[in-house]
Amino acid sequence: MRSTCLSLGILLSATSFAGSFTIQDVFPSDSAGYALTPKLGEPFWMTVRYQVGQNTVGSMQVSAPGAYLNSGGFLSQHGARQATYGPLVHLYDGPMPVRVQIGDALTDVSITPTSASRGVEYHTPRHWQAEFGAAIQFKFGASSKLEWIIPRAPSFGFQQVQVTRQYDGQLVAQDVYRLLNVNQIASNFFSTSSSVRINAQTLRSVKFDALKKLPNDVKAYVKSETYIESGDRNVKNLVSAALPKNFQKNLSVYDAAQALYLAVITKLQYVDNPGGGPSAAQALRTGYGDCGFFASAFSAACRNAGIPARPIAGFLKGSNEWHVWAEFYVPNHGWVPVDPSFADGLDPQGRYPLYFGVIPELNERVATAIGFDHSFGKYKVPLLQSPYAITDVKKVLSARAWSYLVETN
């Protein structure tokens, strides 16, 4: 996402010449150096106009929340010069501080992007072919009695599924199949995924009173469940520390969710394979978790505060790039996607609400399931990111899941 480009300057060896730089102007631009107002969630460059006292070798650095770019050395000849470097991407709706340094001179500017035209806006669609599946192998002599619960990729929000495989198995819920006694199962589908950005000012107009009457399909996402233990003591403590006592009167739904988002990022440290299911209670008790734990902790905190929230399970482009992010609900505007583990990777101190309603890479992923708990008939599956195996056989030799996502144009 942050490939670099230098539009002016000759790369040299480490040899340098005496001289100094004076910055005259700094502004956001396109890659050719023409001034523009950046769009939220889309790449832009920084251009600096500067004066050089005499021929010298310098470099250009651009730093912003979640990004640091360094051009390396290039020759600047005596006189008035211009350099362009980037790209940067504005990852939250609000003024972004940017520091630009050219040689021995630096300056700070604040960049305010163009927000979305409405509360939640999807843009820049891309088309994908997706496949995911799972396999299980029993030890020799063990019974192979086996049931598979398989998610069918849904159309919603950022994702529109055009074609999906039809199984011979039983459709037990709107987006869930059941298949019996096969050791390997796979699903494939074609989908269009879009990036997302928001208009924070618009979303901030919604107060907590608007949550009193929720649509029936939203009400389920304010309850506690297997891995989203919204009544857990650690969840309650996080909410109490992050929000003022009268937050429901003094904060908008958006601002309360953002405060909880930053609190989760500050509290948790990302680790691969922390063990166990993605429990919000475990994550906030231990302070560790992977993407699923981040998403469940945020969802649990929102639910404790009365804000509907849910994890979204799926995978990214490439092979076996499983991922979980989240959404929270703002009445009259719908679900707002967020990605706390992506934000933690860039700003683990939670200083800025990166990826909070602004996810440029959302068009490089697909979702296989909305939420964690799935109940239908006698079945209750706590996580349905990939095919879920149900068996009474203890002699399992191996079990694995896989995913694959490739762009079709």
Image (tube, rainbow, N blue to C red):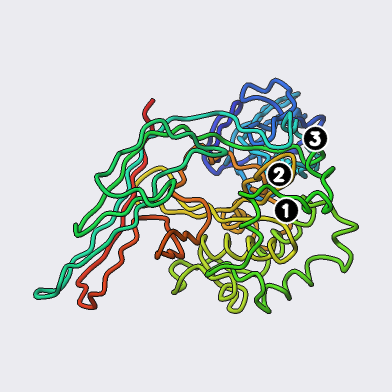
Going by the image, does 251 lie left or right of 162? right
Quarter of the rendering containing residue 118: top right
Residue under pointer 1? 352
**Residue at (19% x, 72% y) in the render:** 397
Going by the image, does 382 lie left or right of 56? left
Q: Nearer the viewer, residue 1 or 203?
A: 203
Q: Check disc 3: other Cα within 10 Å, few if <14, some if 14-19, many if 20+.
A: some
Q: Check disc 2: other Cα within 10 Å, few if <14, some if 14-19, many if 20+.
A: many
Q: Which mark is residue 22?
A: 3
Helix, strand or loop at mark 1? loop
**Residue at (19% x, 60% y) in the render:** 181
Q: Find the distance from the CA under tag 3 to the CA under tag 2.
A: 31 Å
Q: Nearer the viewer, residue 107 or 148?
A: 148
User: Does residue 107 appear in this view?
Assistant: no
Going by the image, does 200 lie left or right of 155? right
Quadrant occupied by the C terminus: top left
Tell me where residue 163 appears, x and y as whole percent: 36, 32
**In the rendered image, the vertical position of residue 393 relative to residue 257, given as above or below:** below
